[in-house]
Amino acid sequence: MMRPGPQIVVIGASAGAVDALGAILPSIPEDSGLSILVVVHVPPDKRSVMAELFRAKCRLMVVEAEDKMPIEPGVVYFAPPDYHLQVEADKTLSLSGDEPVLYSRPSIDVLFESAAEALGPLLIGLILTGANQDGANGMAAIVGAGGIGIVQDPRTAFAPAMPEAAIAACPQVRVLALAEISTFLREVEV
Amino acid sequence: MTELPEKVEDIEIRLLLEALFLRYHYDFRNYAMASIKRRLRQAREQLGFSTFSAMQESILRDADMLPQLLRFMTVQVSEMFRDPSYFRALRERVVPHLKTYPSLKVWVAGCSTGEELYSLVILFREEGLEERTLFYATDINHDALETAQAGIYPMERIPLFTQNHRQSGGKSSLSDYYQAAYGRASLDKTLRKNVVFSDHSLVTDSVFAEMHLISCRNVLIYFDKALQDRALGLFEDSLARRGFLGLGSKESLRFSSHASAFADFVREEKIYQRSSE
Ligand SMILES: C[S@@+](CC[C@H](N)C(=O)[O-])C[C@H]1O[C@@H](n2cnc3c(N)ncnc32)[C@H](O)[C@@H]1O
């Protein structure tokens, strides 16, 4: 049976995020058909720096997500500080100011769970370094909905707690080092 | 096989929202689904229902359930002078235009607990515009409107409000506008003398006055695209020619069918001006 390949990568990262993302995002070529949605835990009062930081380094287009943006191939979307980023069934983004989840807004779980519900089998979920549990439930939701789950090998992570929690919640995920994740995303058939 | 129960839940949610509309005329059917689902799940858990169908039956038959459920349906987060740069742009760029009118109407749509309204009233007072201005503050959440009308906030929020006010270019001290007692800050009653508070839904209600400025921040993100278009149509019809519309910092008209009715006025701050046709 033909199954559409994954089209959308959702990424969650916390402590150590900049380096980990720096090892992955810049290596993805501009003709990649993937759309990439990223939640990084940042303090709510900070003006968003992530999109600017990565715009300079990446070949893909990099933007900060705005409400109702359509999800386009070849674009990286960062969640803005102090808003949850969500995926709607019509393949657009929505933002919300709902309460923080596990003390976080944006929350990785909120992004992953909404994406799983809207677009399950089209997803790759990716959990990177972090010192909390955010994303574990979301990863289980993605894999449960037929998406692919990848977790950074905790032994290679700046902060292992978040990858460990994701693996515990969802043992069937692939556990990979950053270089292998990069290769996987470059080579995946979109 | 995991798909089946989820689909059933989607049907249940739609039926529940339909029930809420048919029975009480609260219309959440076109709210952005991802966050409405999250909040409905929270409501189901905390109100102790095992399914949305059970919740639907209860809400249909027991009117006392309505306020309990409504508490989960809307998001009440606000701050005085939230995003100070927005208020600075109003002060520096929009106020000079408003000063040319002999009388003004300002609509704070989705005013929640009142922080945005009072920020604007203070700004208008500082700029010498308050006396000629009538403010409308509307929301669908009655508890929030009551709080807005009372104008009493916990003292621990005041340092943030004060800092925001200063960063917005405030010309006075925020402490001129409240009295502190028992851990609470009561805003000066005179800030409300030109304010009309009212229950008004951007989904089901219509135009009620001609406005010179509409500030509707962090409300449209909870709507889907069709509903955003409805609300923006309402704003278009409510605004005087060359009137101003301010949205939340991550909201924009870019994806709306009403985009052509407005021009960017301060683009970074999501302040638009109605075109004069
Ligand atoms: C997050 S608060 C925004 C508060 C304030 N505008 C601010 O930016 O600080 C969203 C508000 O929108 C209100 N709201 C939701 N649906 C609405 C509707 N259909 N019509 C009017 N207000 C609505 C909610 O009750 C809530 O008070």
Image: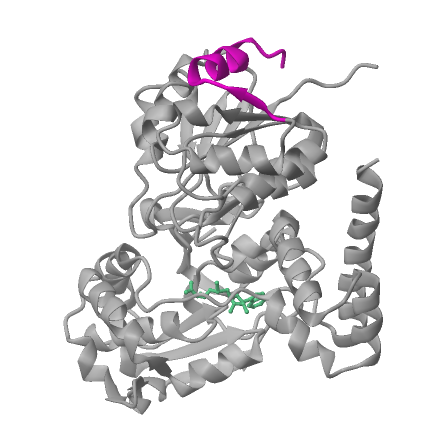
Quarter of the rendering containing residue A3: top right
When the figure is inspected, residue B37 is found, relative to residue B71, above or below; the finding is above
Looking at this view, is B277 or A126 the one in front?
A126
Q: Position of residue A133 (x, y in %)?
A: 49, 44
Is B113 displayed left or right of A6 in the figure?
A: left
Quarter of the rendering containing residue A68: top right
Looking at this view, is B178 or A165 the one in front?
A165
Q: Which residues are magenta?
A: A173-190
Q: Is residue A90 visible?
A: no
Quarter of the image with the C terminus of chain A is top right
Q: Position of residue A67 (x, y in %)?
A: 51, 45
Q: Position of residue A20 (x, y in %)?
A: 37, 25
When the figure is inspected, residue B182 is found, relative to residue B118, above or below; the finding is below
- Residue at the spot x=31%, y=31% of the render? A52
Is B132 displayed left or right of B22 in the figure?
A: left
- Which color scheme did the rendering employ for the protein? one colour
- Residue at the spot x=84%, y=79% of the render? B61
Quarter of the rendering containing residue A129: top left
When the figure is inspected, residue A158 is found, relative to residue B245, above or below; the finding is above
Q: Position of residue A154 (x, y in %)?
A: 45, 27
Looking at this view, is B60 or B156 the one in front?
B156
When the figure is inspected, residue B100 is found, relative to residue B252, above or below; the finding is below
